Image (cartoon, rainbow, N blue to C red):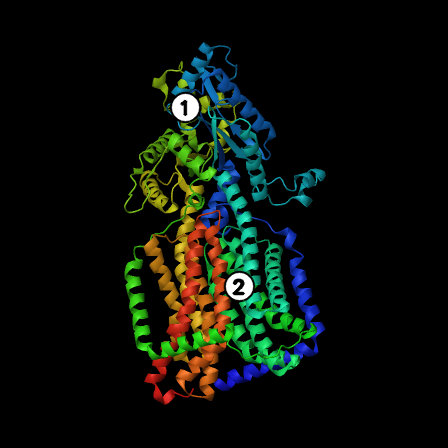
Amino acid sequence: MKTVVERIDKRFEALGFFIVRYRFVVLLSMLFVTLSLIYHLPQIKIDTSTEGFLHKDDPARIAYDSFREQFGRDEKIIIAIKSDGIFTPSNLQRLRDLHHELASEVPYLNEITSLINARNTQGSADTLLVEELFEKWPANRQAIEKIKKLALNNPLYKNLLISEDGTFTVIVLESNTYSAVGDDESDTFTGFEEETSQEKVFISDAENSALVDKARQIIRKYQDSQFQIYLAGSPAVTAFLKSSMMKDMSKFNLIVILTIIIFLSLLFKRISGVVLPILIVVLSVLATIGLMAWSQTPISTMTQIIPSFLLAVGVGASVHVLAIFYKSLDTDKDKERAIAHTLGHSGFAIVMTSLTTAAGIASFSLSQVATVADLGVFAALGILLVLLLSLLLLPALLAILPLKHRPVVHKDGHHDRMECILRRIAVSSHRHARAIVTGSVLFMLVTIFFAVQISYSHNPLKWFKEDHPVRQATEVIDAELKGSISLEIIVDTNKENGLYDYTVLKQIEALAHYALSLKKAADIQGGHPGYFVGKATSVVDIMKEIHKALNANDPGFYVIPEHADLIAQEILLFENSGSDDLEDFVDSTFSKARVTIKMPWIDAYAYKEVLEKLRTYVSTHFDDSATVTLTGLIPLLTTTISAAIDSSGISYLLAFGVIALMMMLVLGSVRLGLISMIPNLFPIFFVLALMVIFDFPLDMFTMLIGSIVIGLAVDDTVHFMHNFVRYHTRHPDTKESIIHALTGTGRAMLITSIVLSIGFFIYMFASMDNLFAFGLLTGSAIIVALLADFYIAPALLALYFRNFKTKEHL
């Protein structure tokens, strides 16, 4: 196998001479490929929606899309107003002005609901009058008190439009279901629908942000200490996520680039040693985002890490190329031979490190979570772009630029001190090999024992810091109005006018009552949040309201009519009154009913129990006459975390298996390949220990760490082990081979690990808390991985060759 590796090294050396000879052809070819991808960059979109976490063919996503097509968007913007006197003349006037300004100024708005235009149903035996609560503006205090009484006594309004104590009210904004993009074009071709019809797309992230931003601007004008206004709801959470994400991306990219510049300057002390690696990684990042734009893959909450990830990871290949190149150039003074020698010496190792890193991140491409799969695909492609540019464009630029050699100065300088430190580490790890390996194994065994304490979590709201306005607003609304997020239940009778059946309506009513009974106290010590259902509304509520109104508004008639003919007659009266509110609860054929269950925004993992109880109830209380589907944001959130958990285990096994096979190929030995994976597992166990100590849960981001760290940690292992095998083949002395390998690659390993760890540590300063643990744990794991390669890997080699004397010569 060693002859194969040597043959590969010769091929890379030949590639170096080829690039030198055709430097301009290679340069133009690489620039053409890169710029062709970058050309699509302006087309990139952003998607921070909840449904965007799931693939379009996921059953939960299909059910949700079907629901939106039928009933519109369930995600509402909630503008809550808290005041000791909502029903005072001045506050009512302010509420009305705010309502009307929002209705007229907010773009992409489908419907607005508040006390100002809330439905007020009155009637007699054969006449039904449906009008707005404030149809006539109250002229005096007596009229206000009458309206206040109507509002507080209406069961539909309670915890939906007004709190039980009357000090909290809301304005609910519902956006358009579909995007407005393309409307102008379609109007131009009216009458030619068959030729120009296009599939409608749901409202875009940009339109959602525009709606939320305009609402924020308007409510600022009405806010004061006596009229406190809170902005919440999932569209607001989505818009703030997008805003925070864009700010963080810009900040992180700048910090990573500055970090790279500083360390490259210290390492190479050459302008070319700084400019060229930066050029390579920046082109790679821009080309990768351009590739995402070309494939219509948006930047999401998960793929936002790709730019800074590629900047930090990608610079490693350039560092290894330039470190060998400058050393060879300063020694031989022949630039062409230096380029060829560099690729011959490190080309294969760089390819394998890039492939192992790509394999680690690509293991996510099979994830059931769409955004995680996108991260796996495009981060891996980005790494391959870095590899391509590092091995082709970078040598071509080195061949073209007028670089001069520098005389080699032998003095007790920084590099010599570093070499002494690395030599001492190599000697120490060889001398204390048994103690190092034993201690490492014991640490990993103990960590496994405690790792079972780690919990699962998915709560986008908690990604915001505690003092963030949208988080505070949501928590206030959850407390005052008993919920801000919904679970939708669709009851399909599968026949026209099936909802005129009294039995079916009683089943729907019973389902709503059962949902309202669901609650669980929080387990503070166990860290498990409690839950409760704050409101359940359906077509049954409208029917009971109509029946009561038609019976002299007697509360005793707030029930479902028992006869199908009476149900149909009362519904007809309601529709003829001019109200279209039924459209929010039933379909046009009166075969499907919608039950909206409102809950507080808690961890998605806690919702699973609610969904399981509801599914059990449905399976035992609904017969074959109706099909019941659970959808909405809550099932989407629970499906996302379940999919992430199911996929993460597969990703870890896939990453470990593929990388282990690559290590066997690099080292030409099955045993050495498996041994080399032990130092790369150690940082994973270290991360698990930190998660237990600091009580970090496994969430959408921390689940990524295992595969990412395995893919990244193995890079240094490849360089160290590859060089060890090269030295050991020529001079079969384990101790000296370890010293040569570590002093030869240790400096580059240290620099790349520092840059890489900083690339992740910066996430600790993100505006969103979910990235704090991800940055801390991943950055720490990179440092630990370097220490594992400095100590554990040499110790394992020392023990291996000590116990296999007959195989001392590879």
Q: Is residue 429 left or right of residue 24?
A: left
- The residue that disc 1 covers is 167
Figure disc tally:
2
Three-letter residue code for mark 1: Thr
Q: Which sits in the foreground, 566 or 88?
A: 88
Seen at 38% across and 49% down, the residue is 457
Within-10-Å neighbours for mark 1: few <14, some 14–19, many 20+ = some
Sequence-wise, the earlier of marks 1 and 2 is 1
Indicate the quadrant containing the C terminus: top left, top right, bottom left or bottom right. Answer: bottom left
How would you rate the neighbour count of disc 2 (Cα within 10 Å): few for under 14, some for 14-19, many for 20 or more?
many
Disc nearest the viewer among 1 and 2: 1
Horizontal arrangement in the rendering, residue 201 relative to residue 487 (left or right): right
Q: Position of residue 389 (x, y in %)?
A: 61, 68
Residue 206 placement (x, y as % from top left): 59, 43
Instruction: Label 1, secondary structure: give it.
Output: loop
Q: Quadrant of residue 157?
A: top left
Placement of 356 over or under 727, stated as above or below: above
Q: Which residue is nearer to you in this view: 784 or 809?
A: 784
| Residue 75: image location, x then y, percent | 49, 38
Eyeballing the image, is 613 above or below 129?
below
- Which residue corresponds to mark 2? 380
Q: Amino acid at mark 2?
A: Ala
Q: Nearer the viewer, residue 407 or 376?
A: 407
Can you give x and y, in whole percent of width and height, for residue 361 in the image?
48, 63
